[in-house]
Image (spheres, helix red, strand yellow):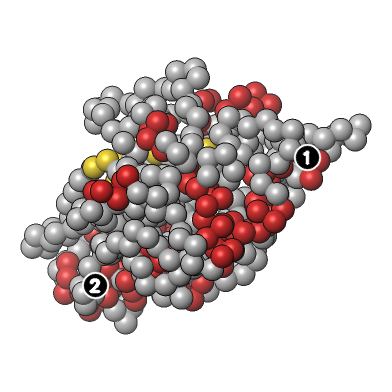
Amino acid sequence: MRQRFSDSVERGERSGNAGRQSASFRSFLTKAFLLGTLTANAPAALAKDCSPASDGSNPCPVTLVRPPVAPLSAMAKLGKALFFDKALSGSGQLSCASCHVPSAHYAPDNALAFAKGGVAMDKFGVRAVPSLTYRERQPPFSVGPDNATSETAPPPPPPPGIKGVKSASNTGASAQAMVPQGGLFWDGRADTLQSQAAGPLFDAREMAATHAGVAARLRHAPYSADLFRLIGAHASDDMLIAEALFALARYQIEAPSFHPYSSRYDAWLEGKTRLTRDEAEGLRLFNDPAKGNCAACHLSAVDEEGRPPLFTDHQYEALAAPRNPLAPKGTYDLGLCAAGRADIGHNDAYCGFFRTPSLRNSATRKVFFHNGVFTTLRQVMDFYVLRDIEPERFYSRRRDGSVRPHDDLPVRYENNIDNTDAPFEKHASPALTPVEREKVIIFLHALTDP
């Protein structure tokens, strides 16, 4: 069994004017298969080879179970107004949509590694802005295969050698280990879309809003009457802000544009289109544990409820991305171990770990990895294949001219770096040739929603 999911990251029911969210996380386990898809109606598909046929068609078509489409609720409509409201920011120049641009799949539409913000618009964030798409099935943070830890006791630290080898042919194996998974942001510091929205809103380097300023805007905005109709006329400032954040979450959960599942790959899964020869070969290489092994972390198969793949296992990896020269000097971004989570604290075993992103719409992104160090998918593919074979292509050099591998992670945390999963295994030659890397990239373009 592979991974815990939740049907809805933000599921709330209102009771009077209380305005409290009642979150319900229903966990279940999923299975992923190397070259197959599974439907509730056709378990026999498990035994079939569901790789693309010679003509690019899908020999195992399925009916995908997508999120239901319905008119937006009143709370979600309010969230939409908030999402585009620049007056919520300290500068009056930034809204959520400024960095999460709808036409760019709710990611930045520029090539800035770090977004510009602050009250005077003279500061920069410290991480690349992720897309907000496909968050409706994001699980909360946990450590372990089934979130078995009690609510009062913190998750146990990982014992030495916990990391199992990840293989696209057996994605269930690594899920049995006590591994960090779930959560939002690159470092998993938030569990809900409400708390995620509060992060950039009140960050002095981003939207730079203040508690008082947001409350004042909520009381005197064009949408204020709608807000008070939903929560009552005598809400406190804290209630106003909490409900505004909840509304933002509802908008992201309910609006189909955040999770359309409308890519060519989705159409192929349903047997409605054919992959080109290069796309089909790229998918094969993507899934092959001896080649790209991409599907070990970026799951490519339909789950056992018939839902489209998210192309992430929601887990964390220490990949040792090169340092971005634009990053703040004299500092290291340690990721998960410095997320400030009370349940795990600062655990050295998690330093350098960042959340595995979905690859959906990755072909339209302008920067990649948590620090935006790469600007093309070809650079990303080259790094995965050549990181340990040609480190001089990616890392800086010391004063004596020697290469400083893993130059964005302190030496004491280097044991955390993934050196075991293909294609990071030690190879005398690259696991993927340049032509094969290009075919994987061609396949990734098939994950783009129109």
Where residue 307 appears, as percent x and y from the top left, is 29, 57
Query: Can the viewer see residue 417 in this picture?
Result: no
Residue 13 sits above or below residue 402 on the image: below
* Label 2: which secondary element: loop
**Residue at the extreme bottom:** 222
Can you say which quadrant of the picture contains the N terminus?
Answer: top left
Of the residues tagged 2 and 1, which is closer to the observer?
Answer: 1
Report the side of 431 relative to 345 (left or right). Answer: right
Residue at the spot of label 1: 390
Report the side of 108 relative to 376 (left or right). Answer: left
Residue 316 or residue 234, whichever sits in front: 316
Where residue 56 appears, as percent x and y from the top left, is 48, 65
Where residue 93 appears, as percent x and y from the top left, is 52, 74
Give the amino acid type for the residue marked by disc 2 in the picture.
Val
Q: Residue at x 27, y 40 (%)?
A: 29
Q: Quadrant of residue 259?
A: bottom left
Q: Residues within 10 Å of mark 2 (few under 14, many from 20)?
A: few
Residue at the spot of label 2: 69
Residue 357 or residue 299, whichever sits in front: 299
Report the side of 58 relative to 240 (left or right). Answer: right
